[in-house]
Image (spheres, rainbow, N blue to C red):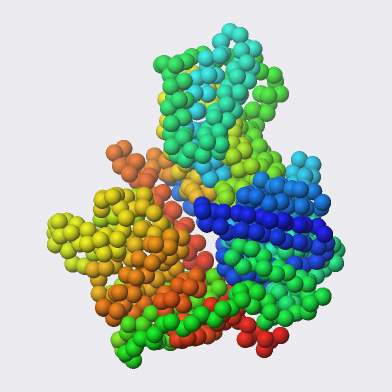
């Protein structure tokens, strides 16, 4: 008897250690810390209204970070994500006419096609033409920006009335009752994030999902094994575009207008979220879901700054410091862990 | 007969790697491929699998004439190859790597369960106890090699080519591999097996084909002609015309410059001890990848974890940091000049002054006029063929690049010069210049040199003493007239020991 219990305790111990070892844990721990601090600082943190507000504030960054994560895991980097987001909002509002509900459907179809096209162009450049991703997407970001400015030189435009469904179902007009019912339970922003997760969940179970990791980890070995690496890189770019498309739906629902420059600051934020979440910039390592964790950490940092009564002038500075401290903590954590494991194996 | 290769020829930029490659492989038999380094055995394997395209000649596989453009085409036809440089994805798990590129679909997702089962089955035979859920980057080189073999086997090939699969494996793992290879052979899989270890070839192969200088010189069917190691060795080395001992033994003053005792570094270097005398040219020989490069790097202080007792001129030193080595004037001319020895985009002049800037006390402003003069001198003495000294090094030919690497140490007092295969990929003229210069330096300044060369001739011609390495150990030391091709090769193959074992 005692033998059996010993064994089971040992196995529990080792599995605990395995959990502790995982990269995920350190970033999730940071998230919990940030979450707690925010909850303490913000008095009405758990009230429905502020929960809804927080979800709306966090969702776009989460979506962009997930898309960016797919590209980074495949060994690339997308500097054009923000510009692509702007372009999609401009396309959506360009096609829609306020009085004609059906134009909303056209807009969604056309914008989706544009999103796929953006992914294909980036993918051809990175995968088939072998242009370094940083350079290529830096260049294409200007193309997307130029196209957005062409169709919408100044912020504005109009949307169909039901388009608010992507932001706030209650105030949307002309939508079926059951959609409203769902919307009153789940925030649209939350639904968009869940759709994103579902998309990635399905893809991660397919060949492409595994090949994205293979190509990001070692392009040459993957090629030698007979994987079409260029195609895999293009698929990663297209998946990223789909996530950008989801974010664009949210923004247009929220603002009821398009803006050729609204996405610019989002690009680097999304990349930062991926890194903070613990996904290696070198590719091949980390889970896409970690991007959600990273995006939440960044968002909570913003909240903390806001509620901690830090003077305006220092807010940006402090947010940078908090991120550095958090990452340093997680690096130290994994270092200690590795040492412990090393000793054990000796 | 499953495979027949006839008269295949392959050149790499004027260098003939394979002049007349012929090879026959029978159904369910294991064919050994033997030969010294650069005899063309790897080249012919790669031509069969489509990594290289042959210049001429024909390959018959299953009675059809085939010509594969890439390894994938060959694999679809049932020819799998275990590569020496591994083709694994470090961030995927063992089983994911084994089925990579051949995943089976199940509904919308992948059939992971059967993939794991297949992997488990193969791994259990090759290396029981290896966790297939581990990531490849957590494995040691031997385990990686096993995964690589498992990956090739999982494709269920009809012809399996194993290019030195045992180099990274331990004895027990080799035994498991051989058992599995026999099993596969009984199922009708043909195999081509390359190895440098004689006993392995003797044990596993049904017949052997021996390559020398890019052509096959013999094929021996063990069933008919019996296993005779001496005969095989004589085929590998060629009809040994015992070259006259021309080298006059030079007087080497007995004083030791560098003495190494008990050098150990992981699996690469095991218990190495030797002494280097003043003005001596000490050769390091042996087959490729037996720890020679590691030995030189260890002497240059590249490995912090390395354990050894080192004395230079009777003084104890620690060789765990490059700085210590350089301060004691132990200077390394690295093997891969493009990667380790040169700033390719910078000019000849800049490359020659970098060591000075790094190591010597400098005046505030670099005395460029003086240094340029010195650089011109180096170019002249080494007869480096360059337009001006401001030409980027990357545009020079390989031999001239190598001269720059050597030349940049010219203005230093060298205690020990380490040369890691300095003449690799260097044309004959430049090679002679380079060695002539080194020989002169040894004579004039009484410098000591440790030379690792993959080419026996260089060792024979220039070395006073040659140490032979085998699997990280020094197995033999040759001196004077004993330094000839025959002795070096038979010592490299460890024939003496294998005879005792077998």
Q: Is residue A169 above or below residue B62?
A: above
Q: Quick one: B78 or A344, which is closer to the camera?
A: B78
Q: Is residue A307 visible in the rendered structure shown here? A: no
Number of labels in the image equals 0
Quadrant of residue A235 within the rendered picture: top right
Q: Quick one: A165 or A230, which is closer to the camera?
A: A230
Residue A84's x, y, as percent? Answer: 50, 28
Residue B284's x, y, as percent? Answer: 47, 77
Q: Say which residue appears at 63% left-offset and 83% top-offset.
A: B495
Q: Quick one: B220 or B332, which is closer to the camera?
A: B220
Residue found farthest to the top: A99
Residue B173's x, y, as percent? Answer: 69, 74
Residue B93's x, y, as percent? Answer: 65, 57
Apparent side of residue A340 relative to residue A15 in the rendered image (left or right): left
Q: Say which residue appears at 55% left-offset and 19% top-offset.
A: A92
Q: Is residue B293 visible in the rendered structure shown here? A: yes
Residue found farthest to the bottom: B254
Q: Say which residue appears at 43% left-offset and 63% top-offset.
A: B428
Q: Say which residue appears at 21% left-offset and 67% top-offset.
A: B360
Q: Quick one: B140 or B190, which is closer to the camera?
A: B190
Q: Is residue A41 above or below residue B489?
A: above
- Quadrant of the rendering where the N terminus of chain A is positioned: bottom right
Q: Is residue A186 above or below residue A278?
A: above
- Quadrant of the rendering where the C terminus of chain A is positioned: bottom right
């Amino acid at each position: 008897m005692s033998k059996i219990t010993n064994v089971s305790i040992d196995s529990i111990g080792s599995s605990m250690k395995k959990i502790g070892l995982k990269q995920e844990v350190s970033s999730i721990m940071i998230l919990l810390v940030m979450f707690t601090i925010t909850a303490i600082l913000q008095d009405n943190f758990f009230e429905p209204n502020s929960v809804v507000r927080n979800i709306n504030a966090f969702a776009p960054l989460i979506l962009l970070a997930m898309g960016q994560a797919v590209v980074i895991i495949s060994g690339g980097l997308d500097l054009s994500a923000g510009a692509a987001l702007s372009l999609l909002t401009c396309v959506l509002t360009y096609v829609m006419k306020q009085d004609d509900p059906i134009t909303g459907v056209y807009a969604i179809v056309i914008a989706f096609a544009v999103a796929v096209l953006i992914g294909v162009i980036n993918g051809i450049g990175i995968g088939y033409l072998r242009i370094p991703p940083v350079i290529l997407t830096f260049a294409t970001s200007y193309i997307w920006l130029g196209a957005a400015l062409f169709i919408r030189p100044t912020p504005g435009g109009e949307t169909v009335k039901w388009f608010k469904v992507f932001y706030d179902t209650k105030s949307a007009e002309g939508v079926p009752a059951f959609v409203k019912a769902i919307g009153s339970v789940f925030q649209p922003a939350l639904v968009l994030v869940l759709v994103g997760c579902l998309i990635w969940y399905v893809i991660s179970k397919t060949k492409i999902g595994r090949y994205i990791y293979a190509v990001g980890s070692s392009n040459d070995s993957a090629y030698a094994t007979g994987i079409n690496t260029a195609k895999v890189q293009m698929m990663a770019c297209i998946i990223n575009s789909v996530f950008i498309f989801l974010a664009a739906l949210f923004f247009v629902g929220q603002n009821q207008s398009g803006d050729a420059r609204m996405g610019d600051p989002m690009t680097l934020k999304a990349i930062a979220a991926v890194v903070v979440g613990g996904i290696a910039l070198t590719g091949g390592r980390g889970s896409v879901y970690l991007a959600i964790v990273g995006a939440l950490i960044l968002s909570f940092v913003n909240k903390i700054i806001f509620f901690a009564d830090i003077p305006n002038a220092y807010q940006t500075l402090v947010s940078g410091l908090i991120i550095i401290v958090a990452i340093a903590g997680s690096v130290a954590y994994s270092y200690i862990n590795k040492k412990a494991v090393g000793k054990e194996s000796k | 007969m499953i495979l027949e290769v006839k008269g295949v020829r392959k050149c790499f930029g004027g260098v003939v790697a394979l002049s007349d490659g012929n090879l026959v492989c029978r159904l369910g038999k294991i064919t050994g491929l033997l030969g010294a380094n650069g005899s063309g055995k790897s080249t012919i394997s790669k031509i069969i699998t489509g990594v290289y395209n042959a210049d001429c000649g024909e390959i018959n596989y299953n009675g059809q004439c085939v010509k594969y453009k890439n390894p994938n085409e060959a694999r679809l036809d049932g020819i799998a190859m275990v590569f020496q440089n591994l083709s694994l994805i470090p961030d995927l798990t063992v089983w994911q790597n084994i089925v990579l590129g051949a995943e089976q679909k199940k509904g919308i997702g992948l059939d992971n369960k059967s993939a794991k089962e297949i992997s488990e089955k193969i791994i259990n035979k090759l290396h029981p106890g290896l966790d297939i859920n581990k990531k490849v980057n957590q494995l040691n080189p031997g385990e990686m090699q096993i995964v690589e073999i498992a990956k090739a086997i999982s494709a269920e090939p009809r012809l399996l080519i194993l290019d030195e699969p045992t180099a990274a494996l331990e004895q027990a793992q080799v035994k498991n591999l051989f058992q599995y290879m026999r099993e596969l052979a009984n199922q009708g899989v043909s195999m081509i097996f390359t190895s440098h270890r004689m006993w392995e070839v003797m044990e596993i192969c049904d017949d052997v084909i021996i390559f020398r200088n890019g052509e096959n010189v013999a094929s021996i069917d063990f069933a008919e002609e019996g296993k005779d190691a001496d005969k095989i060795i004589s085929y590998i080395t060629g009809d040994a015309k015992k070259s006259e001992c021309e080298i006059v033994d030079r007087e080497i003053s007995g004083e030791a410059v560098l003495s190494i005792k008990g050098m150990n570094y992981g699996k690469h270097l095991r218990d190495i001890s030797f002494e280097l005398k003043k003005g001596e040219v000490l050769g390091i020989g042996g087959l490729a990848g037996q720890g020679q490069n590691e030995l030189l790097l260890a002497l240059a202080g590249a490995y912090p974890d390395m354990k050894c007792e080192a004395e230079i001129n009777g003084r104890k030193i620690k060789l765990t940091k490059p700085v210590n080595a350089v301060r004691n004037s132990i200077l390394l001319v690295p093997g891969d000049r493009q990667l380790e020895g040169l700033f390719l985009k910078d000019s000849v002049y800049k490359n020659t002054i970098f060591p000075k800037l790094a190591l010597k006390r400098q005046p505030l402003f670099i005395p460029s006029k003086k240094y340029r003069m010195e650089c011109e001198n180096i170019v002249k003495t080494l007869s480096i063929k360059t337009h001006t000294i401001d030409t980027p090094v990357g545009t020079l030919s390989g031999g001239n690049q190598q001269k720059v690497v050597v030349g940049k140490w010219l203005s230093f007092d060298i205690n020990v010069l380490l040369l890691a295969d300095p003449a690799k990929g260097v044309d004959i003229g430049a090679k002679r210049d380079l060695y002539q210069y080194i020989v002169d330096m040894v004579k004039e300044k009484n410098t000591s040199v440790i030379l690792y060369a993959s080419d026996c001739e260089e060792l024979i011609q220039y070395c006073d003493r040659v140490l032979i390495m085998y699997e990280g150990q020094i197995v033999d030391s040759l001196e004077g007239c004993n330094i000839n091709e025959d002795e070096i090769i038979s010592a490299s193959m460890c024939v003496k020991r294998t005879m005792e074992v077998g």
